[in-house]
Amino acid sequence: MPSNPLLQIQFPIPFDQIRAADVQPAIRELLEDARKHLEQIWQNGRPRTFENTLLALDRLTERLDYAMGIVKHLETVATTPELRAAHNAVEGEVSAFHSSIPLQEPLWKTLRQYAATGEARAIAGTRKRFLTKTLDTFRRHGAELDAPGKARLAGLDVELTRLTTKYAENVLDSTNAFELVITGESRLSGLPATARAAARESAAAKGLDGWRFTLQAPSYQALMTYLDDAALREHVYRAFATRATREPFDNRALIARILELRREKAALLGYRNFADLVLEDRM
């Protein structure tokens, strides 16, 4: 029986071998492995070092993040109903696990213990920066909250993951739902031969006559840049600018709820607003 291609870090990535059926068993196995290694970090009875504390934490989700990154990428660029269902089945679990890491009191205690060691006080350069960033990141993600606060933060993160995933799906589906088929070549004035050929090929692939344009970047950018027909450009521009604003892919209610939850999250963590939370370590 062939091994699951998502279980090992491989370059180049074997996209041709990955199937929707691989996703759930691989991600759940990698989650279980990460949980086990997470506990080992604070259960380690040896003296705290950079390697058995910070590097162990850094490597904790390497395989999980590799696999989930591939799944997210494929769901974005080559989705199928089966792949989307598999992605959505594990996305919440992965998000909950990542959100739980800074909330683990034994792990937070372990990091502070290491930070108080002579080795930690003596490190410099990138290792010092890594330690500082790790401690700051844990604080910004709820490590110092009380138990009810941690529970609420975990719930917020899970719901935000669900909503933002649905938001992205709606944008993708709305983008894919649009097509413009032109049957008269005279309306293609200004469009380069390569763009015309691509549009002709796109139409043929759908069993259509003429030239087919979509909101995908190569098609959209060529049309908006070179097409002489201003009315057609406006039509396509408006379609692009109003993606995911109509049923069945309407994101407007999702946006309102996401903003509400982000405000609550920021306040829970002691920030004036979500922008302050996000920008604190960027600006």
Image: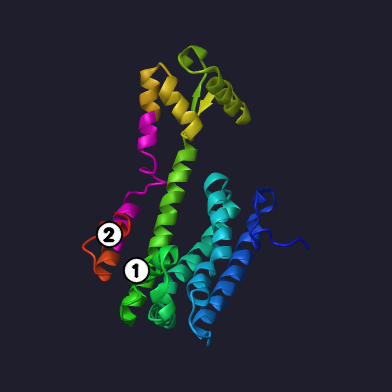
At label 2, which amino acid type do we have? Phe
User: Mark 2 = which residue?
Assistant: 274
| Tag shown at residue 102 | none
Residue at point 68%, 58% (across, down): 5
Magenta region, main secondary structure: helix
Residue at point 32%, 59% (across, down): 281
Residue at point 53%, 70% (across, down): 60
> In this orientation, does residue 22 appear?
yes
Residue 247 among those drawn in magenta: yes
Q: Position of residue 203 (x, y in %)?
A: 58, 26
Give the class, few, some or many, for how many residues have Cα within 10 Å of label 1's Cα (few <14, many ≥20).
few
**Quadrant in which the N terminus is drawn:** bottom right
Residue at point 64%, 51% (across, down): 13
In the image: residue 209, left or right of residue 100: right
Q: Position of residue 99 (x, y in %)?
A: 42, 69
Q: How is the image coloured?
A: rainbow
Q: Label 2: state its secondary structure.
A: helix
Q: Which residues are magenta?
A: 237-262
Q: Marks 1 and 2: which is nearer the front?
A: 1
Q: Label 1: state its secondary structure.
A: helix
User: Mark 1 = which residue?
Assistant: 136
The answer to which of 125 and 107 lies nearer the viewer is 125
At label 1, which amino acid type do we have? Asp
**Quadrant in which the C terminus is drawn:** bottom left
In the image: residue 232, left or right of residue 53: left
Residue 42 among those drawn in magenta: no
How far is disc 1 from disc 2 in space, using C-alphas?
A: 17 Å
| Figure quadrant of residue 230 | top left
Q: Position of residue 70 (x, y in %)?
A: 57, 54
Q: Mark 1 or mark 2: which comes first in sequence?
A: 1
